Image (cartoon, grey):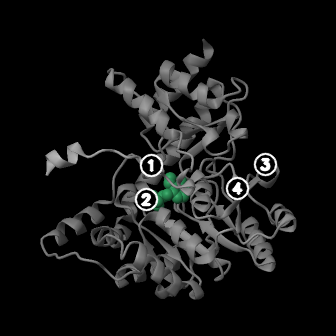
Amino acid sequence: MLEKAKGLLHKGLVAPSGRSGVPPFMVMDVMAAAARLEAQGRRIVHMEVGQPAVGAPAAAVAAVRATLGSGPHGYTETLGIASLRRRIARAYADWHGIEIEAERIVVATGSSAGFMLAFLSAFEAGDRVAVALPGYPPYRHILSALGCEVVAIETSAESRWSITGESLLAQHRIKPLKGVIVASPANPTGTMMTGEALAGLIGCAEEAGITVISDEIYHGLDYAFAAETAAKISEDLIVINSFSKYFCMTGWRIGWMVLPPALIRAVERLQGNLAISVPALSQIAAEAAFDGRAEMEAVKHGYEDNRRILLEGLPKAGFETFLPVDGAFYLYADVSRFCDDSFDFAKRMLEETHVAVTPGVDFDPQRGRHFIRFCYAGSAAEMHEAVERIAAWLRR
Ligand SMILES: Cc1ncc(COP(=O)(O)O)c(C=O)c1O
């Protein structure tokens, strides 16, 4: 068998589709360069990857251990295990004081799968969908792979770096929009929208017939003020959330959506065909994760300390301008004083200080040339070390 496979001729008959030609994540290049330095024995402070340094809550791991011997852990209900959907619904009562019917909760393979389901269920190919710049690149890339037209709206300090009703309607007047994606706290900036700003944007969008998708993956990690859920403002929008960040479960690939009733059956049909269901073990872990809140709050306090260390240390080191560092675990710093190409700057910084960060061009192809993103999800000792190394480097 192996012999025959070896002898086959590669005829080059299969080529990638045009829609698969989405840009790669440049942070991967930084990670690869950091890995090469590590292989040479260098100790790298990793501030490039946007994920918690610790793992899932102990309660989640224990629940999976306890269930492993009692399989079969087969396919689950397409929309998610009923008790998990009820538990997520209860979290909205606990966290936001609102009642959400468990039927509106859909479990997905991370918020990443939630985006695909949301875009497929709410938009047609060719629909125009607005996203903020700077912003999380996969919004743009998934939309374009699905044939939607991405309408990038540049945000600025005047609007606290978020899309406003005005900027949305300005694009809508040029050519009608079908959707808009908002994120608060946002990646790469960590900046949040006030409840008022979010409600204002949602009101304008609804009046214009534009569907709002609210990415709330960094909820729970808010320091400047409490993050508002869009689910409290309207039922006629899609909320996407995840166990990846607050619950430190990136590799478990599990998240959820809160859907308007009209989309539930559509998402069930799509998820049933695309994935059948979400991994059973991850759903069991996710349900138990809610019992690990105390542990996760301690992790959050660690991020708060890290944030303080950077806010005090980086200006002394030479980085004076950041976007509002409200939540998540990111700090988006202006490096225009030092360079015109943040990719090259991040590369040099990695080589010369062994601190890995992400260049802003991933998040904003033009203005990102003047920004780098720090992820402060590591330890306090790493934050101090990074600040010291960078300060010494910039002094040279
Ligand atoms: C803003 C934002 N949304 C969504 C995701 C995807 O998260 P996941 O698919 O792990 O839930 C990320 C990951 O970094 C993110 O930063």
Question: Badge 4 is on which residue?
Answer: 132
Per the rendering, the mark at residue 246 is none
Residue at 14% of width from left, 75% of height from top? Answer: 70
State the residue at coordinates (60%, 26%).
344
CB at mark 2 closer than 8 A to ligand 1?
yes
User: Earlier along the polypeptide chain: callout 1 or callout 2?
Assistant: 1
Mark 2 surroundings: few (<14), some (14-19) or many (≥20) residues within 10 A: many
Residue at the image point whose x is 17% and y is 48% from the top: 4
From the image, tell me which residue sits under label 1: 51
- Front position in the image: 292 or 361: 361
Q: Are marks 3 and 2 in contact (CB under 8 Å)?
A: no
Q: Are marks 1 and 2 in contact (CB under 8 Å)?
A: yes
Camera-side residue: 111 or 298? Answer: 111
Label number found at residue 244? 2
Q: Earlier in the sequence, mark 4 or mark 3?
A: 4
Where does label 3 land, which residue? 156
Describe the element under mark 3 as helix, strand or loop: loop
How far is the residue under mark 1 from the one under mark 2? 8 Å
- The alpha-carbon separation of the residues under discs 3 and 1 comes to 26 Å
What amino acid is at disc 2?
Answer: Ser
Between discs 3 and 2, the one toward the N terminus: 3
Which of marks 1 and 3 precedes in the sequence? 1
- Give whichever of discs 2 and 4 has the lower sequence position: 4
Seen in the picture, residue 45 relative to 230 is either above or below; the reply is above
Q: Earlier in the sequence, mark 1 or mark 4?
A: 1
Relative image position of residue 217 (x, y in whole percent): 53, 62
